[in-house]
Amino acid sequence: MNKRLKAGLIGLGRIGNIHLQNLSRHPDVEKISICAPSAKRESYPRFQLYRTYQELIQKENPDILFICSPTPTHYEIIAECCQLGIDVFCEKPIDLDLGRIQELKKYIDESGIILQVGFNRRFDPDFSSLKNSLEEKALGKIYQITITSRDPGFPSLDYIASSGGMFMDMTIHDFDMCRFLTGSEISEIYTKGQIRINQELTKYNDIDTATTILTFQNEITTTIINSRDAIYGYDQRIEVFGSKGLITVDNHRINNISIADYDGKKANRPVSFFLERYALSYIAEVDEFIKTILRRGKPSVSIDDALKATEIAVYANQSLALKKVIKL
Amino acid sequence: MNKRLKAGLIGLGRIGNIHLQNLSRHPDVEKISICAPSAKRESYPRFQLYRTYQELIQKENPDILFICSPTPTHYEIIAECCQLGIDVFCEKPIDLDLGRIQELKKYIDESGIILQVGFNRRFDPDFSSLKNSLEEKALGKIYQITITSRDPGFPSLDYIASSGGMFMDMTIHDFDMCRFLTGSEISEIYTKGQIRINQELTKYNDIDTATTILTFQNEITTTIINSRDAIYGYDQRIEVFGSKGLITVDNHRINNISIADYDGKKANRPVSFFLERYALSYIAEVDEFIKTILRRGKPSVSIDDALKATEIAVYANQSLALKKVIKL
Amino acid sequence: MNKRLKAGLIGLGRIGNIHLQNLSRHPDVEKISICAPSAKRESYPRFQLYRTYQELIQKENPDILFICSPTPTHYEIIAECCQLGIDVFCEKPIDLDLGRIQELKKYIDESGIILQVGFNRRFDPDFSSLKNSLEEKALGKIYQITITSRDPGFPSLDYIASSGGMFMDMTIHDFDMCRFLTGSEISEIYTKGQIRINQELTKYNDIDTATTILTFQNEITTTIINSRDAIYGYDQRIEVFGSKGLITVDNHRINNISIADYDGKKANRPVSFFLERYALSYIAEVDEFIKTILRRGKPSVSIDDALKATEIAVYANQSLALKKVIKL
Amino acid sequence: MNKRLKAGLIGLGRIGNIHLQNLSRHPDVEKISICAPSAKRESYPRFQLYRTYQELIQKENPDILFICSPTPTHYEIIAECCQLGIDVFCEKPIDLDLGRIQELKKYIDESGIILQVGFNRRFDPDFSSLKNSLEEKALGKIYQITITSRDPGFPSLDYIASSGGMFMDMTIHDFDMCRFLTGSEISEIYTKGQIRINQELTKYNDIDTATTILTFQNEITTTIINSRDAIYGYDQRIEVFGSKGLITVDNHRINNISIADYDGKKANRPVSFFLERYALSYIAEVDEFIKTILRRGKPSVSIDDALKATEIAVYANQSLALKKVIKL
């Protein structure tokens, strides 16, 4: 029978709470301790709450640590886990700076800890089923992938300010999805980014609308169509075109009801929040992480994946700044 | 090479005009003469116009006659065609009286003329494709058929007055479709008819809403769901359920456009007029009729089909009046 | 703050396990004890297991009891709960005999206990949203309801033998749904039932295929189309037609992926098991029950609802036996 | 009453035959003469056939001329029509050389003849309805347009050889559609073109797969996704995204039938031939042309539109050759 794990969780924002809920129900997790500087103890009566992650580590000696705190804190915590030999699940982005991610990669490799990155969409049942189909050659030779990825509402400017920009914050999921689906690395990137929705973004040197063409070493071209604000709901679609046909992953609607009247037939809009759209993926990625820990395997989404996706985001920003195609 | 046919057309209502248009384009039709007591000559400059059908027949000696005049005139014209040996395409219903249809059947059989009845829906590409699939056993053993058949707007009370009632006027198409798809004759019928929309129908001893269960000799049960007035458009759907699966024939929408906004995703409504929904069927039934004439074959929709569908309508009216299941 | 409840659960079949899982996560449930004569203790390490319900009640003194044992046991357990003042959630059917349900109703009324019946479909998000739309008059005056309800696989003959027959076992959910959606009681019923799939049912005096027309006192007609075995998956659709339009509740597909190739565009089949299709309804009905208990309210699905749905099943069996319309 | 027109038609390929059929049914066309060097007279018994266009013009003195002959012949015929004052409907592309189109533009302007270019897709009911919606601001401010345009089968290498390349032959329709929908001119273009399907294209300096991003002066970005060979049928979809929502134009399926079995629910594939998909557009563009002729109006699709679309194709080829973004 499996050893049951002691888990630490750092950060109780939206994503921290999701992981807390999924860890609580996991049969291989024995105890969960939380580090959340400002959380109310009475809101989390069943858990031990700490104010610093150091204290949590010292007192609880956790087997695994979930890092859901703000991006700037990731580096230090991961580095410490490497020293102490604690396995880590870290939310994306690991860091906004490529060099620092490379350093972490070195520490991780040297320490032998397992670190999994929170690219949860790979674990979405639809997308992982798509990936399986592609591996089984259901589409033959793959030619083109189109990702339409639009957020359901404009984020706050505060959020924007510390986000690292649209490519690093939002499109990074799509970059990872392209690597995941093509099974290859990019050879070329061009991005056309614009401010079309909110002119205040000029202050933040950010954009809200972008179309990006990535070419991969295996010749597959992928197009990513992004917007920060789609009034019709969270738009998360993928189309893969190959010699044998086309696979489409469509949005998830709120329900299966439609109403027909003189104006036509109306179906409800897509679920409009990422925690709802991707709820099953958060469960699946934690299950996968814990399985990997228990059998000391290789993480399915590693620091290398974080590094590669971040590199693409850096190139995208270069293409945007130079208004040129970037060739690697 | 084929003999080219001389056609006569009686009646220039909606359906008469459709047949005129389709005959005009038919390569095997040499000449078309029209009988229409009140049509303006200048509206039909390319055709010879007569005021009585007798005059048309006498002067033009047509090979084939299309009868699109009001139902009460059908009997006399068909009887005369039997005497003169003129082949006939007659719009449904042949007559509202079963006995008179039986007499006509006798005349037709004795005369050897070909008579095809205008159950056009059998020639709709979707429904004839469905029929082919069933004959090829795509569904294995057929269990249940569901026809949803709702008109897109309430007819005028004048129309109602001379229509023969909802079963004889509207549902008769669905009765014929059930016979066509099951390839069998009914053994039992129950209908629940109601006035739900327009109470004035009480004056006409008619109904506007009905649900009918027909059981066929081969044990297939078919359900027909009717309404005289569907605000959301002309609803003409069929589902066939069998041991191997379910075939669905859906409505034809006005176009392939949809718009998504905060309220959901809206597709346009179905085409809302029978001449538009069934346009291709009117072409196909005339093609079929002319082919049958040229090779002196058996008509694909004969006086027997008219008789059987009318019989079902009579039983439906009995079931409605007696509020009972009618067993045959 | 709420009192937290002690719950007893009788029976660990499919549905018993579902309730166990949902009760375990409920914040207002303090402790769960189980009565399951043959369950292995090691499979349920976190729960106290009893072999008889009497022992469970005596030792644990539960506030609420979930009855998920076979139908014949319901009467006795409910009667005892009435004597002891224990509130009850009982799976459907309460009993196969109308007289015994009437007796239980008397006991319940006299005792003042709260009893909720497991007509879970009322709590399905799609169907409860449909009900809300109808109450808000989204469809104006309602004319016709069509329920297509087909099971995804033929049950075992053992199951059939003790099921009470298709109407009592399967259609009873649809009968309840018709009452729920129309907000009225039936005035007339006709059912056409057949054995089309498995001739062995003759031994059990049961059927596998049925079409039923119910007319309600408020003149709405509802059609229920049933089959025990749909190869294409669990088919659970409802259409409501009214003066302002048509609302359709469609099936839930396994995922949102489709593949297009030369043969067409293929979407995955509906989820094929009731526990999966109705998973959210089981959570919602337990939430509702516990809320009702805590505020001592009226149960949203009461013994009266069980009585009425069972009555319809009895009339359906009469209509089937007599091959007649039954008028009330 | 309108003057009825004498029409000449040059070329009896696929598109020439379509125009012949639509002209034959047009009430404002009195006579049609044809120039087709190799057509069999017996195939066109109702028309006067000429072997050279000069002879047709001389003998018939047509009011309007439809040019459906190979692209290299267009220049000379149009130039002659300018001299003789004959109005012209010319199939796309007018010419593969920008300079020659500019010359023709000068001749046309000087002569005062009306010339309409065969960008038929503007007249497709779906796309023209989309255009109307955009003009009525149904989407508010437009941000992004995505055109997926894939042909249903690889053309012959002979066809490729004289086609002018994929951008000039196939994508030119999409370029025109982008101008039509945005109502603006391009400011920037990047195209990623590849040979993925048929390596023989290297001999022809052509490609079979491309993704193109066009930015327009009004800041709308449009993405065009092309392939020469989609096994799943002719894929012609457009999505327009704006501040108020998303409009989708979907493919036209062969019929409205679907079949559900254990493997899922399968709808038929899109119609797989441009003459079928765009049949209504060919009728509408001829109607529009004849209306324009009769009232001596401005052509809705002029030589300027041909010029602009051809310019975009030239820039696309530049971007492809230089592997760079082209800024105007």
Image: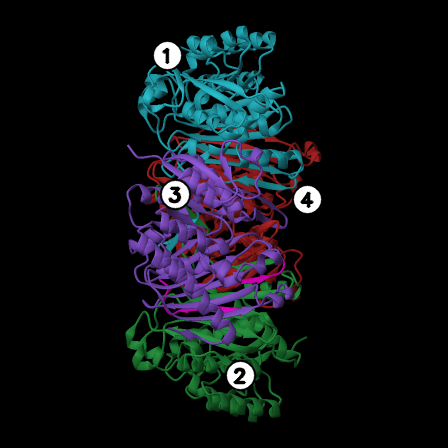
Chain colours: A purple, B red, C cyan, D green
Q: CA distance from mark 4 to mark 3?
A: 76 Å
Residue D255 circle label = none
Disc 2 target residue: D307
Picture layout, residue C164 above or below residue B204? above
Protein chain holding label 3: A
Residues flagged by tags 4 and 3 on a common chain:
no
Q: CA distance from mark 4 to mark 2?
A: 55 Å
2 vs 3, front mark: 3
1 vs 3, front mark: 3
4 vs 3, front mark: 3
Disc 4 target residue: B156
Disc 1 target residue: C51
- The span picked out in magenta is D222-244
Circle 1 residues within 10 Å: few <14, some 14–19, many ≥20: some
Disc 3 target residue: A64
4 vs 2, front mark: 2
Q: CA distance from mark 2 to mark 3?
A: 65 Å
Q: Is residue D223 magenta?
A: yes
